Amino acid sequence: IFYAQCIGYLTGQSWIASAFDGSNATPLQTFFLLGTFFCMLAGVLAAALLHQRGLRDLLGGYRRTVSSFLQSLVGLGPVIIAIVALTFLTTDVALNVPPVIWALLLPISLPLLFIQGSAEELIFRGYIQSQLAALNMHPAVWILLPALLFGVAHYDASLGAAAPWIVLWAVGFGILA
């Protein structure tokens, strides 16, 4: 909230509102949204420190994390390629940003996307799920509860009829993750 208030003070509340609702969002507004995940990442790390749990513990061990990531990449790579191909075959794709600008923004975008994805994984799976498991709860609880929270966190009323489907997809992803 403090982060948004500071940005709002500098840019105006309408700038932030248009970033959150996606109307005429600019690359800078997208960077602002991705930057909000710094706060989530800081929060989960602070909570982990309160429970004397380091980053390695939240990840489940570095070697295991890298191995699991590579296995997932091999398994999901063809699926992602198929989805992208189907999207281009079935949808009119239009450029929102010229390719040169897109390429120039990529070095800023990739680290912010990494932080965004890492923050979500650390809070929902690394922290919440493992804390519930440590309480000796039934696996259904420590798998379903973080998945449901993950789904609800992705609810966006501005998406209309698609909103529940996105929540359902996020819950399913959370269960699989």
Image (cartoon, helix red, strand yellow):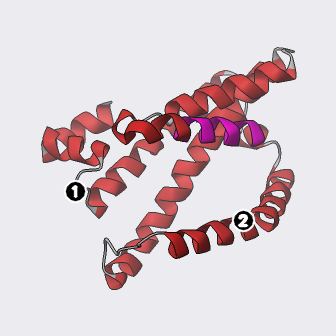
Residue 160 percent coordinates (x, y) = 38, 37
Measuring 40% from the left and 43% from the top, which residue is drawn there? 36
Residue at the spot 87% in from the left edge and 15% down from the top edge: 136
Report, in whole angstroms, how far the alpha carbon at label 2 lies from the one at label 1: 31 Å
Query: In the image, residue 94 lies at what x, y percent?
Result: 35, 74
Q: Are marks 2 and 1 in contact (CB under 8 Å)?
A: no
Residue that appears at 22% across and 56% down: 24
Q: Which residues are magenta?
A: 166-177
The verdict on residue 172 being magenta is yes
* Quadrant of the frame with the N terminus: top left
Position of 30 relative to 89 (above/below): above
Mark 2: amino acid: Val
- Seen as rendered, the residue at the extreme bottom is 100
Which numbered dot is residue 24?
1
Q: Is residue 117 visible?
A: yes
Residue 52 seen in the figure:
no
- Judge by depth and name the residue closer to the eye, 26 or 160: 160
The residue located at (53%, 29%) in the rendering is 152
Q: Amino acid at mark 1?
A: Asn
Q: Quadrant of residue 148?
A: top right
The residue identified by callout 2 is 79
Going by the image, does 135 lie left or right of 79? right
The answer to whether residue 28 is above or below residue 174 is below
Q: Earlier in the sequence, mark 2 or mark 1?
A: 1
> Which quarter of the figure is the C terminus placed in?
top right
Place of residue 73 in the rendered image (x, y in percent of width and height, measured from the top left)? 76, 64
Look at the numbered disc 2 and give the secondary structure of its residue: helix
Q: How many marks?
A: 2
**Secondary structure predominantly adopted by residues drawn in magenta:** helix
Position of 74 relative to 25 (above/below): below
Regarding mark 1 in the picture, which secondary structure is present there? loop
